[in-house]
Amino acid sequence: MVVPVWQPACFYFYTTNMNIARIGDDFFKFAEVVTADRSRVVKMFGMKRQTIIDDFGVGFLKTVPKFQAFINVPDNYGDFKVPPDMYNLYHKLDHQPKRGQWKWTEILLRHIFGDQYELGLDYIQLIYDQPLQLLPVLSLVSKENQTGKTTFLNWLNLLFKDNMIIIGNQELTSQFNFIYGYKLIIALEESRIERSSAQEKLKALATQKKISLNDKFQRSHTVDFFGKLILASNHEDNFISANKYDIRYWVRKIPVIPDENINYNFEADLKNEIDAFVYFLRGRELSTKKESRAWFSTDLIKTEALEMVREQSHTPLYFDLVEALTDYFSTSRQSQLKATAKQLLERLLPKNNQYNSKYLGKVLKDEFLLQYQHGRYDEIHFTSLNAVGRYYTFKAADYVGDKDEFGMEIQSDDSPF
């Protein structure tokens, strides 16, 4: 029987094959696995008590180290002393920072962040120096191949090691989140988040502070959550749904790598530069100060790519109603319109009989960001004066500015038309 030599709160073990620990009431096995590039890494798996007895005998249970609970405390500088009765899920980094060149790393980062290069360095430095700091969801998009999105994710994996994971939509939507719930960086590659439940989960992950880790046949464990989300997608315009008030996303459209920067040894060179880049990062001063909950001001990370996503996030009904309202205000010369959802459908969208009032109400709330008012209102063109109902107010300035299609000034009185 092999008795494991235990090194508390660390994933790096000095045994030939296996370690087992009890954390809370559950048992876990730590086993070395071989990756595609033939490197060896230690992974954690849930293990049943009966399996341990079957493999090693009931007496072996007495030798298994015991921890009270999981904790998740980031430690990129290696200065955190883990309490002996706690198991820290965070992996210490073993880089050896030293002065040196990081030519290919700079080429990669300038390619990914373009004219926002310094912001990109700030983003990476904040993850390293201030891992608890909330950050925007970095989204790298391009319809083309050979853009370096995957190379950038692989480079981050070299930098932050087992504290980063790359998952797909299936893992995101699964009820079992133990593989990613305690990671510093969670990247979704080739993602297109279509289901509303998945989008809501993604938005929640972008801001939450705690997470319940769930795995098959294991009790849930609640730990601190500080994961930074990165999306990489070939869908430039519709990988996510976002409205004009959604400030979670920092969207960058990534160009194809120019011929002069093609290096077939790229990832090997990047790996060799990690220690030099860490040395640089530790001595660098941030180019920005905290200006929002997610550090960066919305103006700093606003891009044309984000505006395109917002535009394409709208439903067909949104575009139909915008066109109808634009036509209405262009010809009526009224400064505002008050109408119920039913009146809008009957008078402005009479040919779109596939829509109903309930659905239009949802679009008005979610996409036009309007709230209805209930009561009596002046209504002339559609029904009568002093109508009563749940009505919405639209202003001409939002659709045609202050002039109609003939260049005439729009009425600016306080009447409804």
Image (cartoon, rainbow, N blue to C red):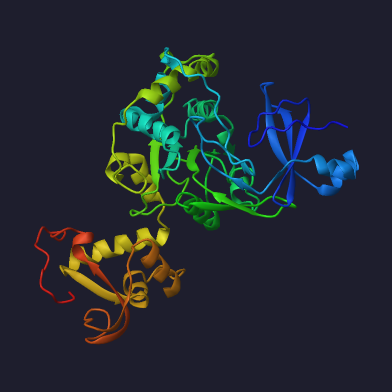
Identify the residue shown where x is 42% and y is 68%: 362
What quarter of the picture does the C terminus occupy? Answer: bottom left
> Residue 303, can we see it?
no
User: In screen coordinates, is 54 left or right of 271?
Assistant: right
User: Can residue 123 be seen from the camera position used here?
Assistant: yes
The quadrant holding residue 33 is top right
Query: Residue sitting at 64 percent across and 51 percent down?
Result: 174
Q: Residue 96 placed where, x, y %?
A: 51, 19
Against 375, residue 227 (above or below) is above
Furthest-front residue in view? 84
- Determine which quarter of the picture holds residue 132: top left
Q: Nearer the viewer, residue 86 or 271?
A: 86
Q: Nearer the viewer, residue 55 or 329?
A: 55
> Residue 135 occupies which quadrant of the picture?
top left
Q: Residue at x 40, y 55 (%)?
A: 314
355 left or right of 303 in image: right
Question: Between 317 and 114, which is closer to the camera in this rendering?
Answer: 114
- Against 220, residue 77 (above or below) is above
Q: Position of residue 209 (x, y in %)?
A: 48, 51
> In the picture provided, is 21 more to the left or to the right than 202?
right
Q: Whole-percent x and y of residue 372?
A: 33, 74
**Residue 57 falls left or right of residue 279:** right
Residue 281, placed above or below residue 300: above
- The quadrant of the image that shows the N terminus is top right
- Position of 171 relative to 146 (above/below): below
Q: How many marks?
A: 0
Name the spot of residue 150 as percent of width and height, x first.
52, 29
